[in-house]
Image (spheres, helix red, strand yellow):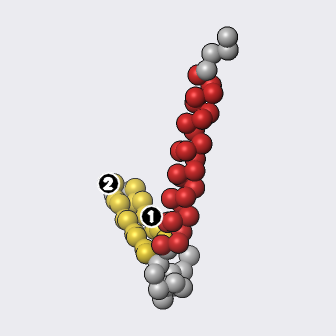
């Protein structure tokens, strides 16, 4: 995979981690994100968390 020379979005954030364990194990991770992408993830996670409360409440209700 080739790395772009410039970011497609000037607000793009990048992170890279290289981890070597011993002489034979090498782990590499790269991530790219934009502020809009982070906001979208925040909205999705908050909607999931808010929808869990009514599900738990209805599952714990005892029918009489």
Q: Quadrant of residue 37?
A: bottom right
Image coordinates of residue 22 in percent, x first then y, are: 32, 54
Residue sitting at the far front: 64
- Disc 1 vs disc 2: which is toward the camera? 1
Gap between marks 1 and 2 measured at Cα = 17 Å
Closer to the chain start, of discs 1 and 2, is 2
Q: Label 2 neighbourhood size at 10 Å, few (<14), some (14-19), many (20+)?
A: few
Q: Is residue 47 above or below residue 40?
A: above
Label 2 sits on a secondary structure element that is loop
Quarter placement of the C terminus: top right
Are dots 1 and 2 in contact, CB under 8 Å? no
Count the labels in the image. Answer: 2
Q: Residue at x 47, y 86 (%)?
A: 10
Q: Residue at x 55, y 44 (%)?
A: 50
Residue sitting at the far left: 22
Query: Could you say which is closer to the camera, residue 40 or residue 57?
Result: 57
Q: Is residue 59 above or below residue 11?
A: above
Query: Which residue carries the number 1 mark?
Result: 29
Label 1 sits on a secondary structure element that is strand
Residue 3 got which mark?
none
Query: Is 56 on the left or on the right of 10, as rendered?
Result: right
Q: Residue at x 54, y 85 (%)?
A: 8
Query: Could you say which is closer to the camera, residue 29 or residue 59?
Result: 59
Image coordinates of residue 11 in percent, x first then y, are: 46, 81
Residue sitting at the far bottom: 5
Image coordinates of residue 58 in percent, x first then y, are: 63, 27
Query: Which residue carries the number 2 mark?
Result: 22
Q: Is residue 31 above or below residue 25?
A: below
Q: Is residue 9 above or below residue 45?
A: below
Q: Residue at x 60, y 35 (%)?
A: 54
Q: Label 1 neighbourhood size at 10 Å, few (<14), some (14-19), many (20+)?
A: few
Query: Could you say which is closer to the camera, residue 59 or residue 25?
Result: 59
């Amino acid at each position: 995979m080739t790395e772009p020379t410039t970011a497609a979005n000037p607000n793009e954030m990048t992170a890279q981690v290289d981890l070597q364990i011993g002489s034979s194990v090498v782990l590499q991770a790269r991530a790219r994100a934009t502020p809009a992408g982070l906001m979208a993830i925040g909205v999705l996670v908050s909607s999931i968390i808010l929808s869990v409360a009514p599900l738990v409440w209805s599952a714990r209700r005892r029918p009489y």
